[in-house]
Amino acid sequence: MHPADSPSVPPPLPSSARRPLAFGLAAAGVALLFAAFTGHMWEDYFITFRASLNLATGQGLVFQPGERVHSFTSPLGTLLPALFALGGGEDVAVRALWILRFVSALALGGALWLAVRAWQRDGLATLAVTAAGVAWIFDAKTVDFATNGMETALVVFFVTWTWQAFSAGARLWPCALACTGLQWTRPDGFVFYAVIAGAWLVFGATREGRSWPDRVAFLARAIGLGIVLYLPWLLWAWHYYGSPIPHTILAKGGLLGAGEVARLLALYPLNLLFGHTALQDIFLPAYHFFGGWPDALRIISRVIVTGAALAWLWPRVATGGRMASAAFFLGGFYVSYIPPFAWYFPGWQALALISWAYLLQAIWRAQPAAPWASRMLPSGLRIGALLLMLTQTAIFGCVAWQMRKQQDLIENHHRAEIGRWLRHEAGAKDTVFLECLGYIGYYSGLKMLDHPGLAAPEVVAVRRAGRTAWAQIIGTLEPTWVILRPIEARRVFADLPDLRNRYELVRTFDTRAAIDAEPVLPGRGYLNFDAVFLVYRRAASSPPPP
């Protein structure tokens, strides 16, 4: 008897079942290898984890014990680390993050598994599946933020699940659970759900032969059920914090005026074609604008984004692809509005890569009338797919090296050290004003008056009163300590010169020599931005705030 025929040995999986599993395992494995190589722990992870640890140690789900401030954005991104932090320990932050990394790797692999299954269901060619799948696996921004402590992998999973649930026939429970998952992951998860559901109303529901009243009724039931499943968290947060809206959203709100927002949204479609929009940057390395990256990457990102955003206009693109493309296009309005924070982008990148899988399939199946075009099309498409995969892989390698150095030179031996130094030098009731809240806030354990006020209602209140400049905030709240980058210090003391008499420079933390000693460092400008911090203390002659 052949081993495959033995009752104790399962038969080999057919190729159609092996491929999604292989892609999913590859995505999970690459993510964990990236985490092991870089050790990257994102600044904002420590903002969230300070609340997670307080919950795990019985002090409440708060950043500062005794102050019920909703200082985090993602419920799951905070509750899971709290669960993993039970038991405490000296290295509790690292231990909790590694467990979260395994969960995130499974989520990232599960997302690609869902996508590849859908691509096979729709009969996509090997070239289309391979190109989109490899580009997904080696997308540096997605992998980094899926493993550095953010909720990114969960966002990507639930976005992909939402698209798959609607494109596969729109059954009630999968669509409702996907809606719930998005909301439990991020309070703006409804934006992803809205654009995917809107694309389904136009494209997917038509394929299924549903009338408009049936489509709207189904969507209302799915959203209603999703809200019911999310309601326990919403009601608890409302009761505990006094508001259902995270304080992080309140702090970040109002950064753009109403007129500027209207202009951005109105010009987005035109800028997508002929100008520049924030959506066109989402495939660039995180914080690319600090420098150290080739300008050619901007062209590549623009091509990827524009093709994905407009694929829904081509009838040859299959329904699943048109849905993803239309959702991605609509999402560009939201991306134009929100701050350009890199961890906001991977969910939209997933929709773009889904769109490209179908777009490549449509191009592959196209039959140009001209004989020369018919001969050149397959070769050109193969070259284009290869360039996409090679570009993503090259960026991935460069970002892995960059983040390894970022963690070593900036986080471990710079910002964390500032926090430890403050814990030793400061009093228990001292307050600190700064922008980068994570490492310094976590390792110092002090009361933080951060800008824009993610963990500090006092800062938000001062800003709402019209005193929005950093100098005005410092002058009003009079923190014990002020930590500034040199460029920030110049602006603060220029805006309010009297602060020079009220604060004295007591310590300079400078890691520029270590950064300059690195002969090869992609994205060097990103590290240089945080290379120097100036620590000021309120002068003894300056009275404490009332």
Image (spheres, rainbow, N blue to C red):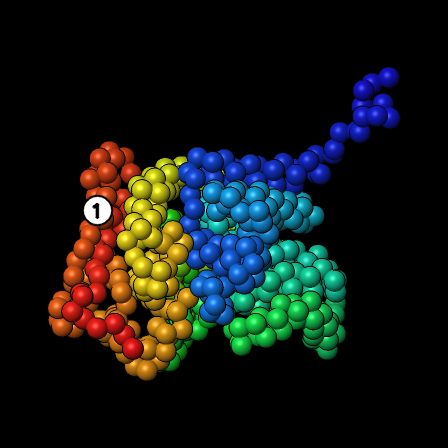
Q: Residues within 10 Å of mark 1 (few under 14, many from 20)?
A: some
Residue for badge 1: 510
Residue 223 appearing in the image: no
Relative vertical location of residue 466 with respect to residue 186 in this rendering, above or below: below
Residue at the image position 35 percent from the left and 43 percent from the top: 412
Horizontal and vertical percent for residue 404? 37, 38
Residue at the image position 74 percent from the left and 62 percent from the top: 173
The secondary structure type at the circle numbered 1 is strand
Residue 262 appearing in the image: yes
On the rendered image, what quadrant is the C terminus found in?
bottom left
View extreme (top): residue: 1
Quarter of the image for residue 191 reads: bottom right
Left or right placement of residue 491 versus residue 359 in this view: left
**Which of the pair 62/466 is nearer the observer?**
62
Left or right placement of residue 192 versus residue 14 in this view: left
**Which of the pair 308/404 is nearer the observer?**
404
Horizontal and vertical percent for residue 505? 17, 58
Horizontal and vertical percent for residue 247? 46, 70
**Which of the pair 296/426 is nearer the observer?**
426
Relative vertical location of residue 397 with respect to residue 70 in this rendering, above or below: above
Residue at the image position 32 percent from the left and 82 percent from the top: 465
**Which of the pair 465/381 is nearer the observer?**
465
Horizontal and vertical percent for residue 177? 69, 61
On the rendered image, what quadrant is the N terminus found in?
top right
Residue at the image position 40 percent from the left and 59 percent from the top: 341
Q: Which amino acid does label 1 sit on?
A: Asp
- Count how many numbered circles sit on residues in the image: 1
Quarter of the image for residue 294 reads: top left
